[in-house]
Image (tube, coloured by chain):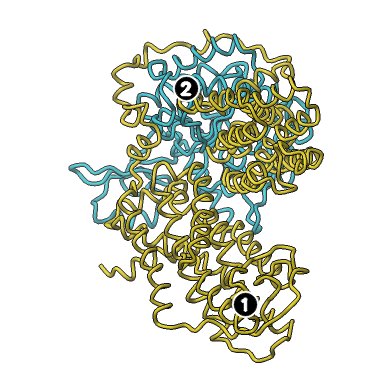
Amino acid sequence: MNHARVLYHMVRADFLERVRRYSFLLTLAFAAYLAWGAATGRVVLRLDEYRGVFNSAWVGSMMTVVGTMFISLVGFYIVKNAILRDEQTRVGRILASTPMSRLFYTLAKTLSNFAVLTLMIAVLAATALFMQFTHAEDTHYHLGTLLAPFLWVGMPAMAVTAAVAVLFETLPVLRGGVGNVIYFFVWISALAVSDKKGIDDYAGFFVIAHSMQAALKKVDSAYNNNGFALSIGDSALVTKRFVWTGVDWTAAIIWHRMLWVLIALAIAGAASLFFHRFDPARAWSLRRKKAPGAANMNRDTLTAAGPNVEGRPSVGRLTPMVSEARESRFWQLVVSELRLMLQGQRWWWYVVALGLLIASVASPTLDARSGVIAVAWLWPTLVWSQMGARESRHATESLIFSSAGTLNRQLPAVWVAGFMVAALTGGGYALRLLTSADWHGLFAWFAGALFIPSLALGLGTLSGTSKPFEAIYTVWWYLGPLNHAPGFDFVGSVPATSRALFCLVLSGVLMTAAYFGRRARMAYV
Amino acid sequence: MQLVIDGVSKRYSGGNWALKGFTLALKPGVLGLLGPNGAGKTTLMSILATITRATEGRVTWNGIDVASHPDELRAVLGFLPQDFGVYPNLNAVEFLEYLAAVKGLEAATSRRRIDELLNLVNLADVRKRPLGGYSGGMKQRVGIAQALLNDPQLLIVDEPTAGLDPEERVRFRNLLSDLSGERIVILSTHIVSDVEATATDIALIAQGTLVAHDSPEELLRRVEGKVWEWVLPSAELNNAKQKYLISNTSRRSDGVHARVLADAPPDGAQPVTPNLEDAYLFCLSHHRAGAAA
């Protein structure tokens, strides 16, 4: 067997399948948006009040930092479906019946992920050249200098992102929504650790940062070697320029960067150890260990237990159904939706939720309560993330959409159920606000409780998957409820950063989007 | 009770017509919708089940336009799609209870009916097991049960016996026979024997158009005197296939017994009683010949 040929075709088929989907256009649109932000000065790489003259070295490195920073986060969520897609299309089972090894498979998926991420980086590279041309601060074009940071910094970072995505998909705990939430914290921790220690990180920022800082130090001795920031919307902070001619790509630096490629390959190799090779029994038992035997159930079980053809019950003896007064069954549907949302949660999930509820009532200080409510509203993320996406994920659209009143009954019922989850998990905090007659706080809490299911339903309905909510909500939660960034704090525990009215308006917009998103998926309404 | 499909066409992106001017009026009974792969059966089923919008034409239920008032039809519709999913963490009872709530059915009555339906589809013993562990055939039976939840006046079943074992297939055929009466049942399949056992009417569809719509007896009449059994040496079988439409062959000690569809018998062939498969192949070959001409 020609291994290289097999690998090539596996990567090629996977890559083509991806880029021929409409969703890939969104991927490129994201890369183009990033590039546009950087090219128009909305995203600025600055060293205190300095930025570099837009020569080939600077624009190439700046775009690399922008791309690596964002694509290593967003790109992970984009490519973390390579194995899932093979499951959904059922191609995986065909592949599993071939001599293909697990290592080959995870390696091929890593390379395919890498190709997609590289394409996004390529969009930024092309824009870098365009940026140098339009700004015309330095008209000497050095293609090698411009592309070097993409090659030595961007690509190894993408290799690691690609491999980690495959690893997450193969690990039973991380392949679903839990992994989507955890990755954000892994990503931000990786960047934070390298920032603190000043070490070479997988994103490679400090290769560029050290070189820029050293160059600036020569120009301005007052510069303290600390400032290196990617700022969004802070271009006014930049008042000075300096000339930077690029990183001196020594063999040592390149070797360090290549180490990350080797690490990526090692991660892909590790992923192969956990890869279930599309064994449905194994995949199922990993997902649901509490139901042993279910995976092995087959028709023999039934044949032994079931009645024979002659002994069958008759259709004529079925209970006649009452079909009138459909509208009055709304609350019955809400309860069903709530049950469906919470179904499958383990006992410890409820214990933690209850613990957070009690803690939010019992916490003596506002700071403590504020922290507890933030966690209490992170805990059900995976419960909310099913909203609007469940029908598509489990292929029940044809069953649900052919029922009467789906748009006007089922969709609002899902939203009400999501609100109930928010109200129940955050109820302790609301109770404290109520007993202390903090009406502003209560209003902010209410707006937050409306906002979360609206965001989930809006994103779930529009995308048909739970991933956008899991990724966006986690980032939003980190910025808002945890770090109280203005405009993001939907919990409203800190009055200065609370934006309750904004939350309400946004909830309205998201619910409208959910309505029209669902409406567009249905043939008749 | 009447379902009228009036000049319905469906064009998919890329300009491919899956249905073209399909017209059919249905009254209570079991309609077997037969056609080869890619004939447009599933597209038609999806349009009738209000899942897909027709590009042209209209569908009316008891005189009401389904495009304008889809809920009029949905309220009395039972639909078993060709491909559908289940929620893996729910058991059969929970899943059916959920769908009963979505359909707006009264809780207490639907609970009783769910128990009965699970008995009917032979899943009573595994009713409390998560659906994620069900086999394909078992999931299909859950699909059959959900389609009957609301005691539908219009029951649409698309390839319902796919994945069922022979015993369950017989059960399902019997079930469909029981269901016929004061309701319209549309059974879409390419398995002729399923239709033979249950249908009161048959519609043949090919290349998105209606080829024939008749009772099984009338379709059989069309091929009377046109079906022959011909015994020939196996070496001559390939030549015979070039010359005649052969619906079946079986090898025996005296040679290959070929079932030939032709106006005039091959030399030495004996007339045999036609079956529905012969009628189906005959109508399709005539349609193809007409389309080619």
Same-subunit check for callouts 1 and 2: no
Residue at (47% x, 76% y) in the render: A152
Coordinates of residue A306 in the picture (x, y in percent): 34, 16
Please identify, in this view, whether the residue under mark 1 or under mark 2 is nearer the observer.
1
Q: Does A119 sit above or below residue A96?
A: below
Q: Does A17 sit above or below residue A447?
A: below
Considering depth in this image, is B186 or B268 the residue closer to the camera? B186
**How far apart are labels 1 and 2 at the CA level?**
54 Å
Residue at (67% x, 32% y) in the render: A366
Considering depth in this image, is B253 or A184 the residue closer to the camera? A184
Q: The yellow chain is which one?
A: A
Residue that extends furthest to the left in the rendered view of this protein: B253
Coordinates of residue A479 in the picture (x, y in percent): 65, 48
Pointer 2 local density, CA inside 10 Å: few below 14, some 14–19, many at least 20: many
Q: The cyan chain is which one?
A: B
Tags 1 and 2 touching, CB below 8 Å: no
